[in-house]
Amino acid sequence: MTPPASIGFLLLPGYAMMSLASAIEPLRAANQLGPRPLYRLDFLAAESGFVASSVGGGFNCAALREAAADLDLLFVVAGGNPMLHDDPALIHGLRNLDRRGVRLGGISGGAAVLARHGLMEGRRFTVHWLHIEELQELAPGLLIERALYVIDRDRYTCAGGVSAFDMMCAMIASQHGAAFAHEVSDWFIHSRMRTASEPQQLDPARRYNLHHPRLEAAVRLMTTHIADPLSAAQLAGLSGCSTRQLQRRFADHFGMSISDFYRNLRLEKADELLRHSALPLAEIAQLTGFATVQHFSRCFARHFGTPPARRRRDGTVGGGLAPPPAPAQSATPWKTSSETCRR
Protein backbone atom coordinates (compact mmCIF):
# COMPACT_ATOMS: atom_id res chain seq x y z
CA MET A 1 0.00 0.00 0.00
CA THR A 2 1.27 3.46 -0.90
CA PRO A 3 2.29 5.32 2.27
CA PRO A 4 0.61 8.66 2.97
CA ALA A 5 2.37 11.80 1.77
CA SER A 6 4.20 13.50 4.61
CA ILE A 7 3.24 17.18 4.92
CA GLY A 8 5.02 19.34 7.49
CA PHE A 9 3.92 22.69 8.89
CA LEU A 10 6.67 24.88 10.30
CA LEU A 11 4.94 27.24 12.72
CA LEU A 12 6.46 30.63 13.49
CA PRO A 13 5.18 32.30 16.69
CA GLY A 14 2.12 34.44 16.08
CA TYR A 15 0.97 32.56 12.96
CA ALA A 16 -2.70 32.99 12.02
CA MET A 17 -4.75 30.06 13.25
CA MET A 18 -7.31 30.55 10.45
CA SER A 19 -4.62 30.18 7.79
CA LEU A 20 -3.27 27.00 9.37
CA ALA A 21 -6.72 25.48 9.89
CA SER A 22 -7.63 26.24 6.27
CA ALA A 23 -4.57 24.26 5.20
CA ILE A 24 -4.81 21.22 7.47
CA GLU A 25 -8.57 20.62 7.46
CA PRO A 26 -8.82 19.65 3.76
CA LEU A 27 -6.02 17.12 4.33
CA ARG A 28 -7.81 15.70 7.37
CA ALA A 29 -11.00 15.38 5.35
CA ALA A 30 -9.11 13.68 2.51
CA ASN A 31 -7.90 11.09 5.01
CA GLN A 32 -11.47 10.45 6.15
CA LEU A 33 -13.05 10.41 2.72
CA GLY A 34 -10.32 8.53 0.88
CA PRO A 35 -9.90 4.76 0.65
CA ARG A 36 -6.86 5.00 2.93
CA PRO A 37 -4.92 7.68 4.81
CA LEU A 38 -3.52 9.97 2.11
CA TYR A 39 -1.60 12.54 4.18
CA ARG A 40 0.46 12.53 7.36
CA LEU A 41 0.64 15.88 9.11
CA ASP A 42 3.72 16.92 11.13
CA PHE A 43 3.93 20.12 13.17
CA LEU A 44 7.41 21.60 13.49
CA ALA A 45 9.09 24.66 14.97
CA ALA A 46 12.55 26.14 15.40
CA GLU A 47 12.74 24.28 18.72
CA SER A 48 10.47 21.60 20.17
CA GLY A 49 7.60 22.74 22.34
CA PHE A 50 4.31 24.61 22.24
CA VAL A 51 3.98 27.33 19.58
CA ALA A 52 1.18 29.83 20.10
CA SER A 53 -0.84 31.35 17.30
CA SER A 54 -2.07 34.94 17.12
CA VAL A 55 -5.08 33.96 19.25
CA GLY A 56 -3.08 32.09 21.87
CA GLY A 57 -4.04 28.54 20.97
CA GLY A 58 -1.46 26.44 19.20
CA PHE A 59 0.30 23.13 18.71
CA ASN A 60 3.02 21.12 20.36
CA CYS A 61 5.76 20.88 17.76
CA ALA A 62 8.90 18.86 17.12
CA ALA A 63 12.12 20.70 16.29
CA LEU A 64 12.75 21.29 12.59
CA ARG A 65 16.07 19.42 12.84
CA GLU A 66 14.02 16.35 13.83
CA ALA A 67 11.88 16.46 10.68
CA ALA A 68 11.13 13.00 9.34
CA ALA A 69 13.49 11.69 6.70
CA ASP A 70 10.52 10.97 4.42
CA LEU A 71 9.12 14.52 4.55
CA ASP A 72 7.61 15.35 1.15
CA LEU A 73 6.51 18.97 1.56
CA LEU A 74 7.06 21.61 4.23
CA PHE A 75 4.95 24.74 4.63
CA VAL A 76 6.26 27.75 6.52
CA VAL A 77 3.29 29.32 8.32
CA ALA A 78 3.89 32.91 9.44
CA GLY A 79 1.74 35.81 10.57
CA GLY A 80 2.48 39.26 11.94
CA ASN A 81 5.41 40.83 10.11
CA PRO A 82 7.46 38.02 8.55
CA MET A 83 9.91 40.59 7.18
CA LEU A 84 11.34 40.86 10.69
CA HIS A 85 11.94 37.14 11.06
CA ASP A 86 15.62 36.23 11.23
CA ASP A 87 16.63 32.88 12.70
CA PRO A 88 19.88 31.62 11.09
CA ALA A 89 19.48 28.08 12.45
CA LEU A 90 15.94 27.79 11.10
CA ILE A 91 16.93 29.14 7.68
CA HIS A 92 19.86 26.72 7.62
CA GLY A 93 17.38 23.91 8.28
CA LEU A 94 15.12 25.04 5.44
CA ARG A 95 18.05 25.16 3.04
CA ASN A 96 19.06 21.66 4.07
CA LEU A 97 15.56 20.41 3.32
CA ASP A 98 15.65 22.15 -0.07
CA ARG A 99 18.95 20.43 -0.88
CA ARG A 100 17.37 17.10 0.10
CA GLY A 101 14.68 17.69 -2.51
CA VAL A 102 11.86 18.44 -0.05
CA ARG A 103 9.28 20.71 -1.65
CA LEU A 104 8.73 24.00 0.18
CA GLY A 105 5.69 26.19 0.63
CA GLY A 106 4.57 29.34 2.35
CA ILE A 107 1.23 30.20 3.91
CA SER A 108 0.33 33.86 4.48
CA GLY A 109 3.68 35.48 5.40
CA GLY A 110 5.54 32.18 5.08
CA ALA A 111 6.43 32.86 1.47
CA ALA A 112 8.01 36.17 2.53
CA VAL A 113 10.30 34.30 4.92
CA LEU A 114 11.36 31.93 2.14
CA ALA A 115 11.83 34.78 -0.34
CA ARG A 116 13.91 36.92 2.03
CA HIS A 117 16.40 34.09 2.34
CA GLY A 118 16.73 33.18 -1.33
CA LEU A 119 14.46 30.15 -1.37
CA MET A 120 11.98 31.50 -3.94
CA GLU A 121 14.45 32.52 -6.66
CA GLY A 122 13.31 31.48 -10.12
CA ARG A 123 9.88 30.50 -8.82
CA ARG A 124 6.54 32.22 -9.22
CA PHE A 125 4.85 32.75 -5.88
CA THR A 126 2.34 34.77 -3.94
CA VAL A 127 2.21 36.24 -0.48
CA HIS A 128 -0.27 38.22 1.63
CA TRP A 129 -0.84 41.59 -0.02
CA LEU A 130 0.51 43.46 3.02
CA HIS A 131 4.03 42.25 2.23
CA ILE A 132 4.15 42.53 -1.57
CA GLU A 133 5.54 46.06 -1.92
CA GLU A 134 8.17 45.59 0.76
CA LEU A 135 9.37 42.37 -0.86
CA GLN A 136 9.49 44.01 -4.28
CA GLU A 137 11.65 46.81 -2.88
CA LEU A 138 13.92 44.29 -1.21
CA ALA A 139 14.41 42.21 -4.36
CA PRO A 140 12.85 43.63 -7.58
CA GLY A 141 13.54 40.40 -9.48
CA LEU A 142 11.21 38.27 -7.36
CA LEU A 143 8.35 36.67 -9.32
CA ILE A 144 5.51 37.78 -7.06
CA GLU A 145 1.95 37.38 -8.30
CA ARG A 146 -1.16 38.93 -6.78
CA ALA A 147 -2.97 35.64 -6.68
CA LEU A 148 -4.83 33.49 -4.18
CA TYR A 149 -2.22 30.78 -4.51
CA VAL A 150 0.56 29.74 -6.86
CA ILE A 151 1.90 26.24 -7.41
CA ASP A 152 5.17 26.36 -9.34
CA ARG A 153 6.84 22.96 -9.50
CA ASP A 154 8.34 22.42 -6.04
CA ARG A 155 6.95 25.59 -4.45
CA TYR A 156 3.44 25.97 -3.01
CA THR A 157 2.38 29.41 -1.77
CA CYS A 158 -0.85 31.12 -0.82
CA ALA A 159 -1.89 34.53 0.46
CA GLY A 160 -3.24 33.16 3.74
CA GLY A 161 -6.70 33.02 5.25
CA VAL A 162 -9.10 30.79 3.36
CA SER A 163 -6.87 30.81 0.26
CA ALA A 164 -4.95 27.98 1.94
CA PHE A 165 -8.09 25.86 1.59
CA ASP A 166 -8.24 26.48 -2.17
CA MET A 167 -4.53 25.69 -2.58
CA MET A 168 -4.88 22.40 -0.72
CA CYS A 169 -7.90 21.43 -2.81
CA ALA A 170 -5.87 22.19 -5.96
CA MET A 171 -3.06 19.98 -4.64
CA ILE A 172 -5.52 17.19 -3.82
CA ALA A 173 -7.02 17.49 -7.32
CA SER A 174 -3.60 17.16 -8.97
CA GLN A 175 -2.82 14.05 -6.90
CA HIS A 176 -6.17 12.30 -6.54
CA GLY A 177 -8.48 13.81 -9.13
CA ALA A 178 -10.85 16.75 -9.40
CA ALA A 179 -13.91 14.75 -8.34
CA PHE A 180 -12.29 13.76 -5.04
CA ALA A 181 -11.14 17.35 -4.43
CA HIS A 182 -14.71 18.55 -4.96
CA GLU A 183 -15.88 15.94 -2.48
CA VAL A 184 -13.43 17.33 0.06
CA SER A 185 -14.57 20.89 -0.69
CA ASP A 186 -18.24 19.94 -0.34
CA TRP A 187 -17.46 18.34 3.04
CA PHE A 188 -16.87 21.88 4.33
CA ILE A 189 -19.89 23.35 2.51
CA HIS A 190 -17.39 25.12 0.25
CA SER A 191 -19.30 24.63 -2.96
CA ARG A 192 -16.83 26.24 -5.35
CA MET A 193 -13.06 25.79 -5.35
CA ARG A 194 -11.49 29.07 -6.41
CA THR A 195 -8.82 29.15 -9.08
CA ALA A 196 -5.31 30.39 -8.29
CA SER A 197 -5.60 33.67 -10.20
CA GLU A 198 -9.18 34.54 -9.28
CA PRO A 199 -8.42 37.97 -7.78
CA GLN A 200 -6.92 39.06 -11.11
CA GLN A 201 -8.94 37.09 -13.63
CA LEU A 202 -12.39 35.67 -14.01
CA ASP A 203 -12.93 32.14 -12.82
CA PRO A 204 -12.19 29.69 -15.70
CA ALA A 205 -15.85 28.68 -15.85
CA ARG A 206 -16.85 32.27 -16.61
CA ARG A 207 -13.73 33.34 -18.48
CA TYR A 208 -14.14 30.58 -21.06
CA ASN A 209 -17.91 30.09 -20.74
CA LEU A 210 -17.49 26.55 -19.43
CA HIS A 211 -20.55 24.53 -18.54
CA HIS A 212 -19.15 21.01 -18.33
CA PRO A 213 -17.50 19.97 -15.04
CA ARG A 214 -14.86 17.77 -16.70
CA LEU A 215 -13.79 20.57 -19.02
CA GLU A 216 -13.70 23.07 -16.15
CA ALA A 217 -11.65 20.67 -14.00
CA ALA A 218 -9.10 20.21 -16.79
CA VAL A 219 -8.66 23.96 -17.31
CA ARG A 220 -8.24 24.47 -13.57
CA LEU A 221 -5.51 21.81 -13.49
CA MET A 222 -3.74 23.52 -16.38
CA THR A 223 -3.65 26.84 -14.51
CA THR A 224 -1.85 25.21 -11.57
CA HIS A 225 0.61 23.27 -13.74
CA ILE A 226 2.25 25.89 -15.92
CA ALA A 227 5.93 25.06 -15.38
CA ASP A 228 5.33 21.32 -15.19
CA PRO A 229 2.61 20.60 -17.77
CA LEU A 230 0.46 17.53 -17.33
CA SER A 231 -0.09 15.15 -20.23
CA ALA A 232 -3.49 14.84 -21.88
CA ALA A 233 -3.89 11.44 -20.24
CA GLN A 234 -3.10 12.89 -16.81
CA LEU A 235 -5.53 15.76 -17.30
CA ALA A 236 -8.26 13.37 -18.39
CA GLY A 237 -7.66 10.94 -15.55
CA LEU A 238 -7.62 13.66 -12.90
CA SER A 239 -10.73 15.24 -14.43
CA GLY A 240 -12.61 11.95 -14.35
CA CYS A 241 -12.96 11.05 -18.01
CA SER A 242 -11.09 9.38 -20.86
CA THR A 243 -8.54 11.21 -23.00
CA ARG A 244 -10.78 10.78 -26.04
CA GLN A 245 -13.76 12.30 -24.24
CA LEU A 246 -11.70 15.26 -23.03
CA GLN A 247 -10.23 15.83 -26.50
CA ARG A 248 -13.75 15.95 -27.89
CA ARG A 249 -14.83 18.47 -25.23
CA PHE A 250 -11.91 20.78 -26.10
CA ALA A 251 -12.57 20.46 -29.82
CA ASP A 252 -16.28 21.18 -29.42
CA HIS A 253 -15.87 24.14 -27.06
CA PHE A 254 -12.59 25.74 -28.11
CA GLY A 255 -12.13 24.44 -31.63
CA MET A 256 -8.66 23.14 -30.75
CA SER A 257 -6.91 20.23 -29.12
CA ILE A 258 -5.98 19.90 -25.46
CA SER A 259 -2.31 20.44 -26.29
CA ASP A 260 -3.01 23.57 -28.37
CA PHE A 261 -5.11 25.15 -25.62
CA TYR A 262 -2.58 24.24 -22.91
CA ARG A 263 0.36 25.56 -24.93
CA ASN A 264 -1.45 28.85 -25.56
CA LEU A 265 -2.26 29.18 -21.86
CA ARG A 266 1.45 28.79 -21.06
CA LEU A 267 2.42 31.29 -23.75
CA GLU A 268 0.03 33.87 -22.26
CA LYS A 269 1.81 33.37 -18.93
CA ALA A 270 5.15 33.81 -20.71
CA ASP A 271 3.92 37.09 -22.19
CA GLU A 272 2.93 38.23 -18.69
CA LEU A 273 6.42 37.41 -17.40
CA LEU A 274 7.96 39.31 -20.30
CA ARG A 275 5.93 42.38 -19.35
CA HIS A 276 6.45 42.26 -15.62
CA SER A 277 10.00 41.00 -15.19
CA ALA A 278 13.49 41.30 -16.59
CA LEU A 279 14.01 37.54 -16.57
CA PRO A 280 16.14 36.03 -19.33
CA LEU A 281 14.21 34.18 -22.00
CA ALA A 282 15.69 30.87 -20.85
CA GLU A 283 14.15 31.32 -17.40
CA ILE A 284 10.79 32.34 -18.84
CA ALA A 285 10.85 29.25 -21.03
CA GLN A 286 11.52 27.07 -17.98
CA LEU A 287 8.84 28.78 -15.91
CA THR A 288 6.25 28.12 -18.59
CA GLY A 289 7.11 24.50 -19.25
CA PHE A 290 9.19 24.63 -22.45
CA ALA A 291 12.19 22.34 -22.66
CA THR A 292 14.43 24.78 -24.56
CA VAL A 293 14.50 28.50 -25.24
CA GLN A 294 14.63 27.79 -28.98
CA HIS A 295 11.42 25.78 -28.87
CA PHE A 296 9.78 28.42 -26.67
CA SER A 297 10.78 31.19 -29.09
CA ARG A 298 9.33 29.34 -32.08
CA CYS A 299 6.02 28.71 -30.33
CA PHE A 300 5.86 32.28 -29.03
CA ALA A 301 6.49 33.73 -32.50
CA ARG A 302 3.75 31.58 -34.02
CA HIS A 303 1.27 32.63 -31.35
CA PHE A 304 2.04 36.35 -31.10
CA GLY A 305 3.46 36.99 -34.56
CA THR A 306 6.87 38.13 -33.30
CA PRO A 307 9.74 36.47 -31.41
CA PRO A 308 9.84 37.11 -27.64
CA ALA A 309 13.20 38.91 -27.80
CA ARG A 310 11.91 41.38 -30.39
CA ARG A 311 8.58 41.75 -28.59
CA ARG A 312 10.42 42.81 -25.42
CA ARG A 313 12.99 44.98 -27.26
CA ASP A 314 10.39 46.84 -29.28
CA GLY A 315 8.29 47.49 -26.22
CA THR A 316 5.25 45.87 -27.78
CA VAL A 317 4.39 44.00 -24.62
CA GLY A 318 2.82 46.92 -22.82
CA GLY A 319 -0.71 46.27 -23.95
CA GLY A 320 -1.30 43.41 -21.53
CA LEU A 321 -2.55 39.93 -22.07
CA ALA A 322 -4.95 39.13 -24.84
CA PRO A 323 -8.43 39.62 -23.39
CA PRO A 324 -10.48 36.53 -22.59
CA PRO A 325 -13.30 35.69 -24.96
CA ALA A 326 -16.71 37.13 -24.27
CA PRO A 327 -19.22 34.50 -23.12
CA ALA A 328 -20.80 32.95 -26.16
CA GLN A 329 -22.11 29.68 -27.44
CA SER A 330 -18.73 28.90 -28.96
CA ALA A 331 -15.81 30.48 -27.15
CA THR A 332 -12.40 30.34 -28.79
CA PRO A 333 -9.77 31.89 -26.54
CA TRP A 334 -6.85 32.04 -28.96
CA LYS A 335 -6.01 31.43 -32.54
CA THR A 336 -4.16 28.25 -33.33
CA SER A 337 -2.13 27.06 -36.25
CA SER A 338 -1.97 23.78 -38.05
CA GLU A 339 1.58 23.45 -36.86
CA THR A 340 1.99 21.93 -33.43
CA CYS A 341 4.43 23.05 -30.78
CA ARG A 342 4.83 20.46 -28.13
CA ARG A 343 6.95 20.47 -25.03
Image (cartoon, grey):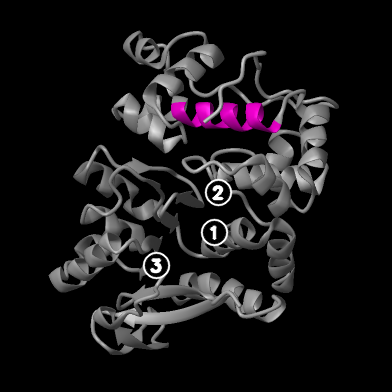
Q: Which mark is residue 196?
A: 2
Q: Quickly name the residue at label 3.
A: 75
Q: In percent of the image, x 22 and y 70: which residue is there?
A: 93
Q: In percent of the image, x 33 and y 33: which residue is there?
A: 283
Left or right: 91 as drawn, with respect to 40: left
- Mark 2 or mark 1: whose residue is earlier in sequence: 1
For the question of whether residue 51 can be seen, the reply is: yes
- Mark 3 or mark 1: whose residue is earlier in sequence: 3
Residue 16 lies in the magenta-colored region: no
Q: Are marks 2 and 1 in contact (CB under 8 Å)?
A: yes
Q: Quadrant of residue 140?
A: top left
- Front disc: 2 or 3: 3
Gap between marks 3 and 1 measured at Cα: 12 Å
Q: Quickly name the residue at label 1.
A: 167
Q: Position of residue 45 (x, y in %)?
A: 30, 80
Amino acid, disc 1: Met
Q: Position of residue 213 (x, y in %)?
A: 79, 48
Amino acid, disc 2: Ala
